[in-house]
Amino acid sequence: MQNLLKNIFPNFSSELISTIEENGSLQDFEAGTILMRTGQYIKNTVLITKGKIKIYREGEDGGEFLMYYLQPGQACAISMICTAKSEKSQIMAKVVEDVSVMMIPLQMMDKWMMEHRSWYEFVIETYRSRFEEVLEVVDNIAFRSMDERLEFYLKRHSDACGCSEVKLSHQEIATELNTSREVISRLLKKMEQRGLVKLNRNQIELLK
Amino acid sequence: MQNLLKNIFPNFSSELISTIEENGSLQDFEAGTILMRTGQYIKNTVLITKGKIKIYREGEDGGEFLMYYLQPGQACAISMICTAKSEKSQIMAKVVEDVSVMMIPLQMMDKWMMEHRSWYEFVIETYRSRFEEVLEVVDNIAFRSMDERLEFYLKRHSDACGCSEVKLSHQEIATELNTSREVISRLLKKMEQRGLVKLNRNQIELLK
DNA sequence: AACCTACAGTAACATTTATCACACAAGGCC
DNA sequence: GGCCTTGTGTGATAAATGTTACTGTAGGTT
């Protein structure tokens, strides 16, 4: 257990890791679980030790706009920001690959900032990297057209899963980009003609 | 001076305010000044004591997409995040109304986090509120059409300046929404027909 | 085999946004 | 006044995206 955390969070000090083990609880969730809903009060800071989570922004009309992935060694910045004042979540988090997460009670968040240098640095770095990721999202929707956004989406997916096959339906992709299934089908067909992908049922193979 | 800072940052402790005065330097900049460019290394954390700043995300093609305003009592979250590791700025900051800003050397940022509870809370709250503001920006461009975004833009402008007259050309608005001047002219015309605004040269009057 | 459901392809059309072209008006300057 | 620059209005058209409608197909179920 010591080794597990130490491997996944190599920058944490030994004392911090002991403290985390004393105060946190390791929980497992299956793919598909909604870990956090928009508007829910947040009671824990979440560290990911295994699996993958997708973070979404929800629209009033029920849209689920994909913001970014969370992977082992990372933490949910929103949960850190909100725990500080026990605010409502502004995002929705869905498990996409069975996860283990370390739940840290909100009181610890503040306390450790003062007591553990490595926790402090981890939190600041989490803020920074998530903020930059959201800025990249803004870039994409503000400056790029749907075909570029789709390419970016597919690339990010394959980076996250570490393989070149995207096992998602056109409808699922459309939902996460807040567009319609037909648009995605058309653009994928064009990408296939350009030799960028190979299309199969429920699977898109990235060729480049 | 003590009173100035105490009024603008009412939650800062007296000791923190003294420390800020010892270590920071108050600087003035005229409207139009670019305070920070994309890609520049950041050397200071910036607290705004007077005036207004707009924060933009720049596109590769030279677009200037408005993210949000900074006003007295607020701080640039990006400058805090980046100073921590002396990273490059991911945004551009432009003065829109003559400002006075308190420049805090980057070493102080970390130091005060440990020493001053009120600084720590201010920083966390700054992260939280700016993060939420960016999420709202994502909402707008991901889920809303240009007419809604224009209305939001005008409302935010009038909130920021505290008046109902928007003294901007259609071209300036178009640039900040990353669209074209003609689109803005047309949408404004429709808003005028709906009785939402009154159009004059270089000035848009909000009626509701 | 017959049936059902989810997924994918695609044509036709509507709407939104972008681009091009040009007219005109307000205000500064000579 | 005549000239210029900047800002605004607007039509025509193109391109991107959204919507509707329908077809077919793969794979599972009965």
Image (cartoon, coloured by chain):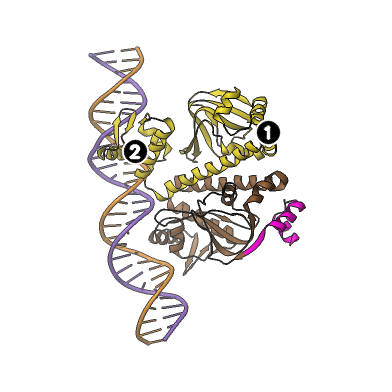
Chain colours: A yellow, B brown, C purple, D orange
Question: How many labels, in total?
Answer: 2
Q: Are marks 2 and 1 on the same chain?
A: yes
Q: Residue at x 59, y 32 (%)?
A: A46
Q: Is residue A62 magenta?
A: no
**B18 vs A107, nearest the viewer:** B18
**B198 vs A180, nearest the viewer:** A180
Q: Find numbered disc 1 in the image and state the secondary structure of the residue it sits on.
A: helix
- For the C terminus of chain B, the image quarter is bottom right
- For the N terminus of chain B, the image quarter is bottom right
Residue A111: x and y in percent read 70, 36
Q: Residue at x 37, y 33 (%)?
A: A171
Q: Is residue B8 magenta?
A: yes
Overall secondary structure of the magenta section = helix
Q: Find numbered disc 2 in the image and state the secondary structure of the residue it sits on.
A: helix
Cα distance between the residues tagged 2 and 1: 44 Å
Local packing at callout 2 (Cα closer than 10 Å; few below 14, some 14-19, many 20+) is many
Under mark 2, the amino acid is Ile
Residue A171 in the figure: left or right of residue A99: left
Local packing at callout 1 (Cα closer than 10 Å; few below 14, some 14-19, many 20+) is some
Q: Which mark is residue A24?
A: none
* Disc 1: which residue: A108
Q: Which mark is residue A184?
A: 2
Residue B208 can be seen in this image: no
